Image (cartoon, grey):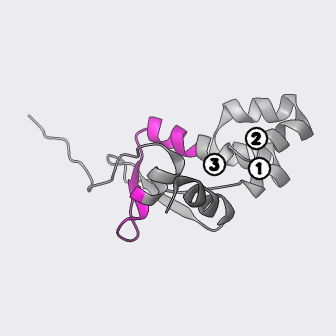
Amino acid sequence: MNPASSTESIASDTSLALQMRHPTSGQSVQASLGYSWRVLLLGPIELVRRGDWRLVAVSLLLPILGQILLAPTANRSYLQWLVRRGFRAVSAHPGQISRIEWALGIQLPRYTGRSSRSAD
């Protein structure tokens, strides 16, 4: 399988999503992959729901053009934003995270269980 066909398959599969979980809070978030139809159709409303204020500003400054330009990359940007906040990928089945990493060209930290803080 070559990288181009894998990227196309992820981009064309709009139902593909990755479960992300924060190791200390246990909060879970579903991160969609591929083209963001919600951003295209709902624009800043979807971005506010996600809490991605940087993209909200772009979408408000360039109303229709901004949504058209953001839709192809909004899900990838959201996934990277979650990783920066400390979220980690949870695999639903073997090889899922590796396949997504390979197609997107980014490395995702894996969730291994809830970390506990020691009371030393």
Q: Where is residue 55 in the image (x, y as percent from the top left)?
A: 71, 34
Mark toward the start of the polypeptide (3 vs 2): 2
| Residue pictured at 33% horizontal, 51% vertical | 110
Q: Where is residue 101 in the image (x, y as percent from the top left)?
A: 45, 51
The outermost residue toward the bottom is 93
Q: How many labels does the image show?
A: 3
The secondary element bearing badge 2 is classed as helix
Mark toward the start of the polypeptide (2 vs 1): 1
**Residue 5 vertical placement versus 45 (above, below):** below
Q: Do the residues labelled 1 and 3 touch (CB within 8 Å)?
A: yes
Q: Bounds of the magenta span?
A: 78-98
Task: Please name whichever residue, 100 or 71, is drawn nearer the observer in this view of the structure.
Answer: 100
69 vs 74, left or right, is: right
Using the numbered discs, state the Cα–Cα distance from disc 2 to disc 1 in whole angstroms.
7 Å
Disc 2 packing (10 Å; few <14; some 14–19; many ≥20): many
Residue with the mark numbered 1:
39
Residue with the mark numbered 3:
75
Which residue type does callout 1 highlight?
Val
Residue with the mark numbered 2:
70
Using the numbered discs, state the Cα–Cα distance from disc 3 to disc 2 in whole angstroms.
9 Å
